Image (cartoon, rainbow, N blue to C red):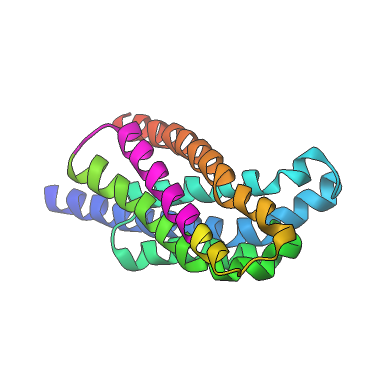
């Protein structure tokens, strides 16, 4: 009887992990691809919401990254979550608009930035069993430094047109800080609710 219960628990856990993995992958892929267009069509391209679509999309992506760090096991799964959002965001063209073509150069820095955010949670929170927000602060700061550093390096080589430098610099520094911070708060709420459900 006990073995049967344990088997059911393991089967449920595997099913739950699979469903969660699929949902996170879809979130990481579909939100950057379609949400910008949905916002533009719903509220208009000149609306305040449309003008801040990068913050909305970025916050959702960062939430997915942190939830992945906490819940997903295996770096192959996490690799997909790290890489998909930036590719789909750039290909869709709705978030960065005319600057999207130049954002291709930023992909390696964005990937590394996403990875260090995830690694901060896996190492500090899960392995070292430290505070959630300590992992968040370290992860956010490191991510922003990596992405901003990548941008500054490319800027020094004259990759970006002068007319787009200020816009891209804001997107790769201040906006990254804002979206990662919002994502951290949203992910904490989800994490808190998950723990409550599991305990109950």
- Residue 111: in sight, yes or no? yes
Q: How many marks?
A: 0
38 on left or right of 169:
right
Q: What residue sits 83% from the left and 47% below the top?
A: 42
Magenta stretch encompasses residue 144? yes
Dominant secondary-structure state across the stretch colored magenta: helix
Q: Position of residue 29 (x, y in %)?
A: 56, 62
Q: Residue at x 50, y 40 (%)?
A: 183
- Above or below, 151 relative to 178: below
- Residue 162 located left or right of residue 70: right
Q: Position of residue 62 (x, y in %)?
A: 49, 48
Which residue is drawn at the image coordinates 56% and 52% (left, top)? 172
The image quarter containing residue 82 is bottom left
- 150 vs 41, left or right, is left
Between residues 20 and 55, which one lies in front from this camera angle?
55
Residue 94 is at least partly visible in this image: no
Query: Residue 117 in the image: x percent, y percent?
Result: 38, 50
Tell me: residue 146, above or below residue 157: above
Check residue 147 for magenta coloring: yes
């Amino acid at each position: 009887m006990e073995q049967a219960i344990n088997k059911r628990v393991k089967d449920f856990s595997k099913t739950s992990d699979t469903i969660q993995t699929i949902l996170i992958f879809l979130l990481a892929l579909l939100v950057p691809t379609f949400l910008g267009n949905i916002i533009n069509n719903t509220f208009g391209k000149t609306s305040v919401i449309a003008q801040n679509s990068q913050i909305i999309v970025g916050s959702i992506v960062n939430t997915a990254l942190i939830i992945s760090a906490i819940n997903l096991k295996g770096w192959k799964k996490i690799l997909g979550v790290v890489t998909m959002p930036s590719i789909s965001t750039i290909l869709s063209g709705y978030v960065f608009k005319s600057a999207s073509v130049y954002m291709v150069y930023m992909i390696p820095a964005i990937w590394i930035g996403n990875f260090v955010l995830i690694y901060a949670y896996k190492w500090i929170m899960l392995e070292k069993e430290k505070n959630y927000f300590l992992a968040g602060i370290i992860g956010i700061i490191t991510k922003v430094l990596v992405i901003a550093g990548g941008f500054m390096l490319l800027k020094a080589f004259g990759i970006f047109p002068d007319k787009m430098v200020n816009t891209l610099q804001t997107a790769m520094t201040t906006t990254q800080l804002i979206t990662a911070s919002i994502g951290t708060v949203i992910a904490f709420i989800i994490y808190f609710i998950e723990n409550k459900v599991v305990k109950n």
